[in-house]
Image: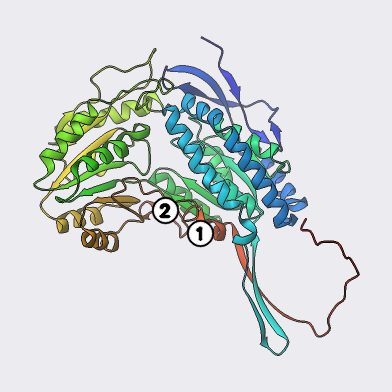
Amino acid sequence: MSTPARITHLVNGASWEGTAERTSPVYNPATGEHTGNLDLASADLVGEVVGIAKSAWQSSWQRSSLTQRAQVLFAFRELLNSRKKDIAAIITSEHGKVLSDAEGEVTRGLEVAEFACGIPHLLKGGFSENVSTKVDVYSIRQPLGVVGVISPFNFPAMVPLWFVPIAIACGNAVIIKPSEKDPSAVNAVAALWKEAGLPDGVLNVVHGDKEAVDALLEHPDVKAISFVGSTPIAQYVYDTGTRAGKRVQALGGAKNHMLVLPDADLDLAADAAVNAGFGSAGERCMAISALVAVEPIADELIAKITDRMGKLVTGDGTRGCDMGPLVTKAHRDKVAGYLDRGVEEGATLVVDGREGDVDADGGGFFLRPTLFDNVKPGMSVYDDEIFGPVLSVVRVRSYDEALALINANQYGNGTAIFTNDGGAARRFQNEVEVGMVGINVPIPVPMAYYSFGGWKASLFGDSHAHGMEGVHFYTRGKVVTSRWLDPSHGGINLGFPQNQ
């Protein structure tokens, strides 16, 4: 067994050279091997990094032209695209998701970088000439300054890429605090920003736990916080950050329902339920965890899902299997604990993920796909966000009963309906109280030029991630009213005008 590597902060364009008072272990979840020791930042170090970021912002980046920013974004996009397999391998080694899924994650993050490349257009304001005699009015958007990003373990590359490219493109300096469970992907992506020509200090990576999070939330020079994680922590981040006078977008947990109507193609629905329920071992905020079947189709649909589950291979994510391990032993044990609780509360355990073989060596953190039937509200397997490969089937008698069930849930992140009835689908998209809706699409994650975010306890704050809401979150609007009584004249230059 090799000696665990040191994983440390990236500050002002270089690896941090100090000595950490506290560290945290990092594991390979497919083998259980202790692969790294992560330096945890103190509040004092966070304060130092905020000062570095503020200085870099004031001295260069806030004054950078849109052309200069776009050039850095285009260079970063090319570097990320060329290295996405390398980033994916890092994700698999620390998170456990299979390589194809990890590469897909990077690709979805790449789409946000591509969106941010259009920042000259995205920041265009409005202009009204001669609103009064010789008076013009126009609007502009300006950066906030230093902003913080706190990202979760389940998408160690994609979620940071939801925020960082747009924040940088808008002219801000960024401090990102990744999950301590799988920190290395963010370090690798941050190195690409430096290679792309981003000035030192504009992007800094600070690793840590609650001490680092609180330091970011409370520092007066951090003007905004973007967060993705569980609902209790999202609520805490929102409350703490807003009390400190910051803008906060805090995306919380989910309990995503997939409604299947009797007229649906049940083979398509079964494929979708398995893909959306067990991809990335269910560690997705957009995973389908509750399948709502309108009778009389439940028995047939469960049989089709069970058949497909029996063909899935769980194992080491580098071996071409369908599903990898969970991120840590503690998380695996927590998810596995729901299986006995579900049975005790009256649900039917159709497929037990604790049984069966896995294609892996060593003591990895594995739990195979699990299926419950006869699940009802009030059971922990329905009420809680399990965040693992556990799919629960809820039987209902009608569309109206299904809609009431979904709307009564505390979460409102994502949902889907499977049907061949266009009228039913249109009614559902209008009546369901959920922020992201799929029609015969089980994981309705929007493209980068739309915005990602839910309703109810799945979102704290008014802004969703990326898209134009992201651009507005990382900028402040200003309206200018001007009057110039005399024209000004420039010199002679017959060369073709160029932007710089």
Locate residue 383 relative to residue 158 in the image: left or right: left
User: Residue 302, relative to residue 123: is it above or below?
Assistant: above
Residue 21 figure quarter? top right
Looking at the image, is mark 1 or mark 2 earlier in the sequence?
A: 2
- Judge the density around disc 1: few (<14), some (14-19), many (≥20) Cα neighbours within 10 Å: some
Look at the numbered discs 1 and 2 and tell me whether their residues touch, using CB distance below 8 Å: yes
- Judge the density around disc 2: few (<14), some (14-19), many (≥20) Cα neighbours within 10 Å: many
Q: Position of residue 2 (x, y in %)?
A: 54, 11
Camera sees residue 380? no
Checking the image for residue 147, the label placed there is none
Checking the image for residue 453, the label placed there is 2
**Residue denoted by label 1:** 469
User: Residue 222, relative to residue 192: is it above or below?
Assistant: below
Residue 300 figure quarter? top left
Q: Residue at x 88, y 72 (%)?
A: 490
Q: Residue at x 43, y 55 (%)?
A: 460
Q: Position of residue 213 (x, y in %)?
A: 54, 42
Question: Residue 359 versus residue 335: which sits nearer the camera?
Answer: 359
Locate residue 286 relative to residue 205 in the image: left or right: left
Residue 481 figure quarter? bottom right
The residue tagged with tag 2: helix, strand or loop? loop
The residue tagged with tag 1: helix, strand or loop? helix
